[in-house]
Amino acid sequence: MTAALVIRPFDMKDEEAAVALWRDCGLLRPWNDPHKDIARKQTVQPGLFLVALVPGGDGVEVLVGTAMAGYDGHRGSVYYLAVAPGHQQLAIGRSLMARVEQQLLAMGCPKINVLVRTSNVKVVAFYEKLGYARDDALSLGKRLIPDL
């Protein structure tokens, strides 16, 4: 892990850096407006939207990771887990997930589900190293409010 890593709740001043990170990590999709996702998250369990920061060359903290989580009383979920390409393999993602797991456990959450595209072999392997296993389930979705 990066020695000076700071993990804290998202603040609106982090918005542009978070969206840029998600773009750099290939998480954005044309049918999801990330700014709307952030605005929605700020109305529901905002403390479960975390950012990871490291000191920059000029002493200003640089956002290098995010994790957006939620708990519905039955299962926890994690979205937008991202670590800047130049900061991967430094245990930042592992640290973000550990914090999310701690927060969800403190809320009484018995299980966490994550959605990973099956083609994203690298990320599937990351979660498997953290103890996550494939469920015999199919994820289905239905958009209720179009973003675009």
Image (tube, grey):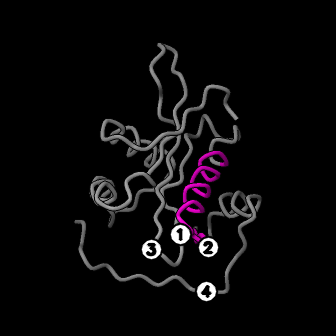
The Cα atoms of the two marked residues, 3 and 2, are separated by: 11 Å
- Left or right: where does residue 3 sit relative to residue 66? right
> Which one is in front, 32 or 114?
114
- Mark carried by residue 110: 2
Res 134 → quadrant:
bottom right
Residue 66, compared with residue 86, is above or below; it is below
- Residue lying furthest top in this view? 58
Res 20 → quadrant:
top left
Residue 123, compared with residue 86, is above or below; it is below
Q: Which residues are magenta?
A: 94-114
| CB contact under 8 Å: marks 3 and 1 | no
Can residue 117 be seen here? The reply is no
Label 4 sits on a secondary structure element that is loop
Give the mark nearer the N terminus: 2 vs 4: 2
Q: Nearer the viewer, mark 4 or mark 3?
A: 3
| CB contact under 8 Å: marks 1 and 4 | no
- Give the residue at x 50% y 52%: 67
The Cα atoms of the two marked residues, 4 and 3, are separated by: 18 Å
135 within the magenta span: no
